[in-house]
Image (cartoon, rainbow, N blue to C red):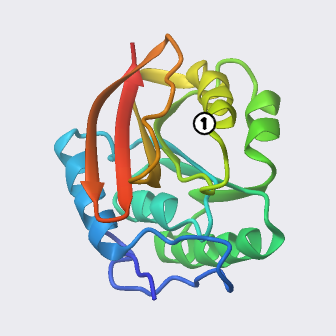
């Protein structure tokens, strides 16, 4: 069972997506990830985008730790419903709507997003079957929606190659945790 690790909602359990279609980020990886993000000072008052959100755990954790707003994007109906339940829990704890859920394909969501809408922190945890050219296309669409100093975190299998970053983004770090690998990028 996943939980909110720290912040306003710290210790509260999160609803998990039933079945095996999603891979929740383990608490160990989540703790390490957020420790790194806090050292980069990118969470407090951030506008966060969680693509391929699954249960929404990464976006929810961000809101619990002080993000200004969080958009969870998930296409699967069951996962989107779980995102909504988890968002409702945190929004109630925060006393206002800080987390929004969008049931949409990631590509469609980014295409519909108005010019000038920018995020400070973006998580991408795509399904393993998503191939590298498709991930590269998503990163290219995302690049125009990153604020100055934004951080993008891509979570993949440790057997996956490094994502193909668009020319307007560059990788500044990566870290492996068993079967999981995280890549950190920023606007070039």
**Residue at image point 62% right, 22% down:** 140
Q: Is residue 59 above or below residue 173?
A: below
**Residue at image point 78% right, 76% down:** 78
In the displayed structure image, the side of residue 54 where residue 6 appears, left or right: left
Q: Kindly identify which residue carries mark 1.
A: 132
Of residues 75 and 12, the one drawn nearer to the viewer in this rendering:
75
Residue 116 appears in the picture as rendered: yes
- Quarter residue 85 falls in: bottom right
**Residue at image point 79% right, 58% down:** 75
Q: Is residue 108 above or below residue 80?
A: above
**Residue at image point 62% right, 66% down:** 54
The quarter of the image holding the C terminus is top left
Q: Position of residue 44 (x, y in %)?
A: 32, 46
Residue 5 appears in the picture as rendered: no
Q: Position of residue 139 (x, y in %)?
A: 59, 29
Of residues 182 and 33, the one drawn nearer to the viewer in this rendering:
182
Q: Position of residue 161 (x, y in %)?
A: 45, 39
Q: Residue furthest front?
A: 159
In the displayed structure image, the side of residue 128 where residue 13 appears, left or right: left
Of residues 169 and 103, the one drawn nearer to the viewer in this rendering:
169
Mark 1 residue crowding within 10 angstroms, few (<14) / some (14–19) / many (20+): some
| Total tally of numbered discs in the picture | 1
Of residues 161 and 111, the one drawn nearer to the viewer in this rendering:
161
**Label 1 residue SS:** helix
């Amino acid at each position: 069972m996943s939980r909110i690790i720290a912040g306003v909602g710290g210790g509260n359990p999160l609803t998990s997506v039933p079945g095996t279609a999603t891979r929740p980020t383990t608490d160990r990886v989540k703790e390490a990830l957020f420790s790194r993000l806090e050292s980069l000072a990118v969470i407090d008052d951030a506008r966060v985008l969680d693509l391929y959100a699954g249960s929404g755990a990464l976006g929810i954790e961000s809101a619990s730790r002080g993000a200004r707003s969080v958009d969870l994007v998930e296409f699967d109906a069951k996962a989107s419903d779980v995102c909504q339940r988890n968002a409702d829990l945190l929004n109630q704890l925060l006393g206002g709507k800080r987390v929004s859920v969008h049931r949409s394909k990631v590509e469609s969501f980014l295409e519909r997003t108005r010019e000038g809408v920018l995020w400070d922190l973006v998580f991408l945890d795509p399904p393993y079957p998503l191939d590298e050219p498709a991930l590269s296309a998503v990163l290219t669409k995302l690049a125009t929606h990153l604020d100055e100093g934004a951080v993008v975190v891509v979570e993949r299998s440790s057997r996956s190659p490094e994502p193909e970053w668009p020319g307007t983004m560059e990788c500044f770090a990566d870290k492996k945790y068993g079967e999981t690998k995280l890549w950190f990028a920023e606007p070039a």
